[in-house]
Image (cartoon, grey):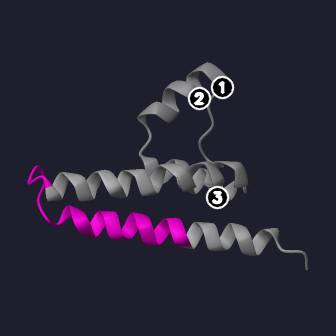
């Protein structure tokens, strides 16, 4: 890769500043199945929180689009992990 940190300490600091999408990209390039399995629990919780916020009139209804995208991404990830686990 073009960008590398010199120590694990600076790498940890840098990862806190990186956008979430960048972490997903790095995990995909590293084929980090454990990372994607770990996201399966958190993403539906985030979607549920978005729905609750909209239902309580604390957030605009447009946030439901993000909830739908998170749920769709969760299903897609789950299916992809399940397909990879099948013997060939």
Please name the residue that numbered disc 3 is placed on. 28
The residue range painted magenta reads 56-75
Please name the residue that numbered disc 1 is placed on. 6
Q: What element carries label 3?
A: helix
Please name the residue that numbered disc 2 is placed on. 11
Disc nearer the start of the sequence (2/3): 2
Disc nearer the start of the sequence (2/1): 1
Disc nearer the start of the sequence (1/3): 1
Query: In the displayed image of the protein, which residue is found farthest to the right?
Result: 88
Residue at x 34% of width, y 56% of height: 48
Q: How far apart are marks 2 and 3 (CA)?
A: 18 Å
Q: Is mark 1 on a helix, strand or loop?
A: loop
Residue at x 14% of width, y 65% of height: 61
From the image, state whether disc 2 or disc 1 is nearer to you. 2
Residue at x 64% of width, y 58% of height: 28
Please say if the residues under marks 2 and 1 sit with CB atoms less than 8 Å apart: no
User: At which x and y percent is residue 72?
Assistant: 45, 72
User: At which x and y percent is residue 77?
Assistant: 59, 67
User: At which x and y percent is residue 30?
Assistant: 71, 53
User: At which x and y percent is residue 42?
Assistant: 48, 49
Tag 3: Cα neighbours inside 10 Å, few (<14), some, or many (≥20)?
Answer: few
Residue at x 66% of width, y 72% of height: 80
Q: How far apart are marks 2 and 1 (CA)?
A: 8 Å
Nearest the camera: 61 or 36?
61
Tag 2: Cα neighbours inside 10 Å, few (<14), some, or many (≥20)?
Answer: few
Nearest the camera: 20 or 36?
36
Q: Is residue 79 above or below residue 28?
A: below
Query: In the displayed image of the protein, which residue is found farthest to the bottom?
Result: 88
Nearest the camera: 4 or 71?
71
From the image, state whether disc 2 or disc 3 is nearer to you. 3
The reply to whether residue 7 is in sight is no
Please say if the residues under marks 2 and 3 sit with CB atoms less than 8 Å apart: no
């Amino acid at each position: 890769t073009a960008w590398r940190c010199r120590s694990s300490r600076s790498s940890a600091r840098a990862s806190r500043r990186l956008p979430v999408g960048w972490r997903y990209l790095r995990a995909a390039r590293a084929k980090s199945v454990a990372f994607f399995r770990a996201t399966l629990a958190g993403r539906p919780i985030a979607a549920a929180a978005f729905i609750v916020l909209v239902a309580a009139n604390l957030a605009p209804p447009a946030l439901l689009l993000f909830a739908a995208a998170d749920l769709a991404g969760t299903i897609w990830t789950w299916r992809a992990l399940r397909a990879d686990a099948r013997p060939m």
